[in-house]
Amino acid sequence: GKPLVEEAYFTGENFITGAIDAVVSGRHSMVYFLTGHGEKSLYDDYSVFRRNLINRNYTPSELNLTISEAVPEDASMIIVAAPQTDLTNDETRKLNEYLDKGGNVAFLMSPNDDDVVYKNFESVMEDFGIGMDYDLVAETDPSLYVGDPYLYQVSIVASDTEYSTQLTDELIEMTNSNIVAFMQNSRSFFKFSAPEDTTLQIESLLQTVSTTDELGNPVSSAIGEPYGGKSSSTIEGQVLDLAMYSASPARNDAKLLVFGSAEFIDDENVEEDFMIVPVFMMLSTISWMHNSNLDTDMGIGNKAKDYDYMLLNSETEAIGTAVLFVAVPFVVAILGAGVWLKRRYS
């Protein structure tokens, strides 16, 4: 039969060498989790996710901006996970100064049923063209949830922008392999109408599952129930954004990520099968924000190896091939050894 050739690639050398380089050079990619607002704890709530970050050459730590004079210079990213109170004006100033230098910030804004208005958090988001709803998203279509209307199927948003392609391509491949994306206990966001920065690149990452109405407009069976703060009426009949990002070239390519929940990466949920897509999305976004490939691109290409295969059409042909490639060389080797021994001792 005709030989077939397949190629396999070893892609790990770049990452292994990068990890060695990080140890030797002493480089640290610091990911700071903000404290002081009742956030989830890096050590008590996110121990598994913390290990995930360490395994990717990040150094996670906590940061209290009421004590620190500024965001540390080594900060690759600031994560705020489920704050129960608002930022102070001084903390907001420090965060904005960090963003003006091209910083990266992620707000994981879990719904809060207390009467809290996140005025300063919203001001940071609105500068990036993102608004926040005071709601708790529920799915009304039983086919899109199992038992709990607050744990429901969602859609990954794919657009043709450079950033979106980097963030969603692999995740879409996962969902094409019958892995369903879910989100739970989330609030929603929206595109803010009039940001001053007209160069912003704003995109959604996760949305409630949509269909189209008789006019071809996208609609969703999910609703946003009023929940805490300045909530008003129920949001219904529209597709709800559950995760968004925005990049600001005018602020040295500063980036903002928002998720409507902080629970999907906590120790209770991070290893659940139904959370695999948002967890990978969060990790992918951290790498994207750091402008790196798992923090280290050593310029080492993938190593290709060719595998040759031969198709044999019958058992007789297989036996003949085995004799040709195995038995004959063995017999030749034995004869050669005999000749060598005879000459040596003659």
Image (cartoon, rainbow, N blue to C red):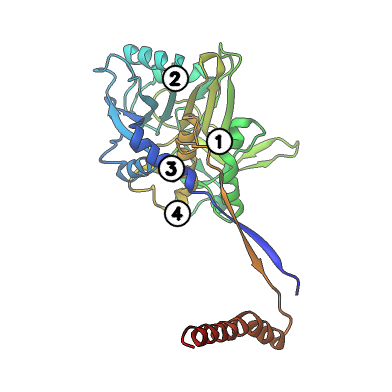
Looking at the image, tell me whether mark 2 or mark 1 is earlier in sequence order.
2
Q: Which residue is mark 2?
A: 122
Element class at badge 1: strand
List x then y, in percent, for residue 194: 58, 14
Element class at badge 4: helix
Disc 3 marks a residue whose amino acid type is: Thr
List x then y, in percent, for residue 280: 48, 44
Q: Residue furthest left?
A: 67
Q: Is residue 96 above or below residue 313?
A: above
Instruction: Tell me if 323 is positioned left or right of 82 in this view.
Output: right
Q: Which residue is mark 4?
A: 273
Looking at the image, tell me whether mark 2 or mark 4 is earlier in sequence order.
2
- Say few, some or many: other residues with alpha carbon within 10 Å of mark 3 (under 14 / 14 to 19 / 20 or more): some
- At 46% across and 43% down in the image, what residue appears? 15
- Tags 1 and 4 touching, CB below 8 Å: no
- Say few, some or many: other residues with alpha carbon within 10 Å of mark 1 (under 14 / 14 to 19 / 20 or more): many
Disc 2 marks a residue whose amino acid type is: Glu
List x then y, in percent, for residue 251: 51, 15
Looking at the image, tell me whether mark 3 or mark 1 is earlier in sequence order.
3
Looking at the image, tell me whether mark 1 or mark 4 is earlier in sequence order.
1
Looking at the image, tell me whether mark 3 or mark 2 is earlier in sequence order.
3
Disc 4 marks a residue whose amino acid type is: Asp
Looking at the image, tell me whether mark 4 or mark 3 is earlier in sequence order.
3
- Tags 3 and 2 touching, CB below 8 Å: no
Q: Which residue is mark 1?
A: 205
Instruction: Tell me if 34 is positioned left or right of 167 in this view.
Output: left
